[in-house]
Amino acid sequence: MTSKQRAYLKGLAMNIDPVFQIGKSSLTPELTQAVDEALEARELIKVTVLKNCLDEGGSIADVLAERTHSQVVQVIGRKIVLYRPAKEEKKRKIVLPEK
């Protein structure tokens, strides 16, 4: 992903609300599955890491991206933005700028 594409996705993410909150149980298989399904439906999601979670936002973002085959767009404090294009071309909502 180029910096131009990342900047475009950051701009889109500013207007969306967090879809998930990660608490003290951290990353469970159920949460990972739910994030995967949300990425397929929305392509771009925001996740909040609550204060009672012992893990840091950056490490959670990396693990989530690896498990869901998505890309970390940005991590600001306890907010994580993930992007993954829909598997089917017809269902894609976000068109990235050319490289």
Image: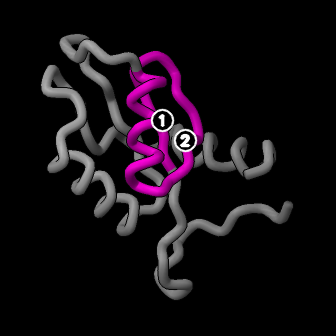
Q: x, y (%) of residue 93?
A: 53, 71
Residue occupying the point 69% across, 45% down: 6
Amino acid at the residue labelled 1? Asp
Residue occupying the point 18% across, 24% down: 23
Q: x, y (%) of residue 3?
A: 79, 42
Q: Which residues fall within the magenta stretch?
A: 57-82
Q: Which residue is mark 2?
A: 72
Eyeballing the image, is 76 above or below 20?
above
Instruction: Say if the magenta span includes residue 18.
Output: no
Which disc is residue 49 wearing? Answer: none
Asked whether 93 or 61 is in front, the reply is: 61
Which disc is residue 62 wearing? Answer: 1
Which corner quadrant holds the C terminus? bottom right
Q: Is residue 32 left or right of residue 43?
A: left
Instruction: Say if the magenta span includes residue 59.
Output: yes
Q: CA distance from mark 1 to mark 2?
A: 7 Å
Q: x, y (%) of residue 33?
A: 23, 56
- Nearest to N terminus: mark 1 or mark 2: 1
Query: Outermost residue, bottom direction?
Result: 90
Asked whether 98 or 61 is in front, the reply is: 61
Q: Is residue 36 left or right of residue 87?
A: left
Q: Is residue 8 left or right of residue 81?
A: right
Asked whether 1 or 94 is in front, the reply is: 1
Instruction: Give the secondary structure at mark 2.
Output: strand
Residue occupying the point 46% across, 47% down: 66
Q: x, y (%) of residue 68?
A: 40, 55
Q: Report crowding for label 2: few under 14, some 14 to 19, many 20 or more residues within 10 A (C-alpha).
A: many
Give yes or no for contact between labels 1 and 2 (Cβ–Cβ under 8 Å): yes
Amino acid at the residue labelled 2? Val
